[in-house]
Image (tube, helix red, strand yellow):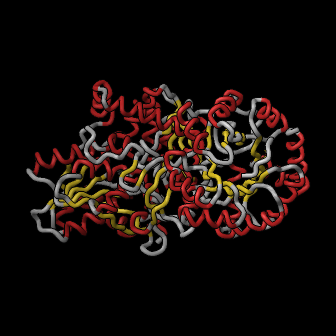
Amino acid sequence: MRLVTPALVVYLMADDGVADLAAAAVEAGATAIELGIPYSDPLADGPTIQRAGQRALDAGMTPSRALAVLAEIDRRVDVPLIPMTYGAIVEAYGVERFCADAAAAGAEGLIVADIPPEESAPLRDAAGGAGIDLIHLVAPTSREERLRAAAGLSRGFVYLVASMGTTGARERLDDRLAGLIGRTKAAAGATPVIAGFGISRPEHVRAVLAAGGDGVIVASAAIDALDEGGAEGFATFVRSLAGALA
Amino acid sequence: MIGTHQPDSLGRFGAFGGRFVPETVMAALDELQAAVNEALADPAFHAERDALARDFIGRPTPLYYAERLSEAVGGAQIWLKREDLNHTGAHKINNAVGQALIARRLGKRRIVAETGAGQHGVAAATVCARFGLDAVVYMGLEDTRRQRPNVVRMHMLGAELVPVTAGAGTLKDAMNEAIRDWIASVETTHYMIGSAAGPHPYPLLVRELQAVIGDEARAQLLDRAGRLPDAVLACVGGGSNAIGMFHAFRDDDVRLIGVEAGGDGAQLHAATLGGGRVSILHGSRSYVLADGEGQVLETHSISAGLDYPGVGPEHAHLKETGRAEYVPETDEAALVAFHRLCRLEGIIPALESAHALARAERVAASLPPAAIVLVCLSGRGDKDVDAIADREAVR
């Protein structure tokens, strides 16, 4: 994937009108867009993304429509697009067909939150065949061998879980963050390491970069900013994190 | 003690099972698996578990020949494995005691659990009181209403009960929240799953802890009747009492029949193996009641313990291989069977178990008097009497 580092990946839930927000995010400094495809039972997600996903489902969002939204975003911005969803959604769609259709819609990467390396072989093959990067995750609890496996299998970047728990804005990141970034960088070689889960403040961005990370993913905090301050509040928030990249 | 029906190294029973969870909890599953392997190989673990089974749970539970029910049905003999007579009123305590011992080996002092009917929640609260652990139980809001007596019991036992408002406020939603809690607290917390579902090694662990049901029943029946049963029946929500009952009979020439919640008999049900498709839910691959896009569907059953859109992966494998049959019984049929057991045998069954009874009556009616039908009476119905009284007063 054409990931510019240091990276600021902004997550948006697939919903009508989200292409405008994606354009605003890139304008404000986002270097990639992660697009959530809603699932009824998102185990890795906290309240903010659960609510956003439920709103999208209630409004009739489907995986096919979400890929159409992705294509619309692709026409508006020129940064890597990364759909994020769960195994049940990808498998119901058909793993190979999903990867092919996502690639055709402009996806350069793919994150599936509940498919660990042990279970990801079919997805890796399908993603590789479609020319998109399958991203694996490492967590503060990952031991050395798991960390090496996830880092070794990741394409595009390694997604480093920066705090324990589900997605959601937090005041503090995990105390082990710097050490985890160091260990992951050592295992990942040239593949960038991007931290997400809990990232919500400019100082978080600076802490990740200072520890050697290649960028951040911001999800719940961006949606919170949107819910509280509308499109303007959202852009202001993204700009504040982008400012911390420099 | 582990039989030949083993999952592979990735926790798969045939095409089902595995681990489909966020990376954050993967290390804890490895740790749990190691602790389980150690415990199962440790005579001290079994000795402590056996002593607790005898003195705390009240095992072995009786095997009871339901003579008047058999006579009324007019066919095979119906025998009941009386898990309703366990301490706390259901089979769930078998698993909770074993997992509490495992949690202690892991050095974890906080327990999270999900509950539907409240029987697993009560069992978890009970063992946490007994072992001095902190219990946090997630229960759907709708279930807290329809299983009120169990809510009161959990409070009295000192558990923190968290009502879950997401979705329909039933077992699936409670399980989502328990897993989310565990993702955040995994380093200090053991997830005491109540069913033979979830990521590996839970389906295997819960089966091993519930296998005592079938082991006892098989020996008791051989002793009393001098023969094996023709059919063994159990209700299936997630499937823990059923897998515990079936496991002992896996290599016998005996029909294994799992009874799912048929709900209203039409669109609203929780018959996952009967009406579902292969997907991923709560950490494992199995049958799931989901739509064509993978979204999980709302379910309905009069029985909170069966009102669940997933099912344990080993049941999916038993269905796929044809070793077990899975059939539905409706809310109405369960209620009829409930009342019949009350009136004919002086036993008030749980609504979950009443589904198995309803099918057992049909199976028995089709067999000659020399035949034997063995039913897991998985729990007692004290928790259900208020809801049934309300429902029937309305009519």
Residue A37: where, in percent of width, then height? 67, 60
Residue B77: where, in percent of width, then height? 15, 61
| Residue at the (47%, 65%) spot, across then down | B391
Query: How many numbered marks are there?
Result: 0
Residue lying at the far bottom in this picture: please name it.
B266
Q: Is residue B245 left or right of residue A188?
A: left
Q: Is residue B79 above or below residue B47?
A: below
* Visible residue check, residue B28: yes
| Residue at the (48%, 38%) spot, across then down | B29
| Residue at the (82%, 59%) spot, across then down | A78
Front residue (pair A3, B9): A3
Q: Is residue A75 above or below residue B172?
A: below
Q: Is residue B84 left or right of residue B113?
A: left
Front residue (pair A64, B89): A64
Front residue (pair B254, B321): B321
| Residue at the (48%, 35%) spot, across then down | B157
Residue B313: where, in percent of width, then height? 40, 53
Name the quadrant containing residue A205.
Answer: top right
Residue B189: where, in percent of width, then height? 54, 33
Q: Which image quarter is the N terminus of chain B in? A: top left
Q: Is residue A215 above or below residue B337?
A: above
Front residue (pair B23, B384): B23
Q: Is residue A44 left or right of residue A202?
A: left
* Visible residue check, residue B120: no
